[in-house]
Amino acid sequence: MPASTVRTISAWLAAHRRAHDIRPAQRAATSWVQAVLALRWLIEATDLKTLARDSGISLATAYRYLHEALEVIAQRAPSLSQVLEQMR
């Protein structure tokens, strides 16, 4: 996967963390690791046990990080009307 894609999603996640984390120092992994985890799950369909192991986090944390990343990515996705407008 391109580093620019990981960098972009990592920046989105970092901004989300700054806005929502009460204790940011408590995170088990960086936003970069979280972005890679989500992209590997989306692109390669890597199972979460493997992703958790490779990231050095628990399976429960991997699930939380995946869901959080998917939420952040979905918030940045264009709406259907925006996509249709771009196609005109």
Image (cartoon, rainbow, N blue to C red):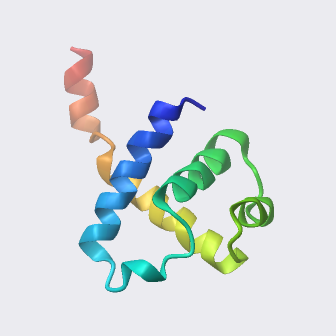
In the visual, does 58 lie left or right of 76?
A: right
- In the depicted view, which residue is nearer to us: 72 or 84? 72
User: In what quadrant of the picture does the C terminus appear?
Assistant: top left
Residue 74 in sight in this render: no
- Which residue lies most toward the front here? 25
Position in image of residue 22 (x %, y %)? 31, 85
> Residue sitting at 45 percent across and 32 percent down?
4
Whether residue 61 is visible, yes or no, is yes
What residue sits 39% from the left and 58% below the top? 13
The answer to which quarter of the image holds residue 28 is: bottom right
Residue at the spot 43% in from the left edge and 50% down from the top edge:
10
On the image, the x and y values in percent for residue 84 come to: 26, 26
Name the one closer to the observer, 31 or 62.
31
Quadrant that contains the N terminus: top right
User: What residue sits 36% from the left and 50% below the top?
Assistant: 11
Image-based side of 56 in relation to 10, left or right: right
Whole-percent x, y for residue 33 in the image:
57, 56
Nearest the camera: 45 or 21?
21
Residue 57, placed above or below residue 75 = below
Q: Eyeballing the image, is 36 above or below 69?
A: above
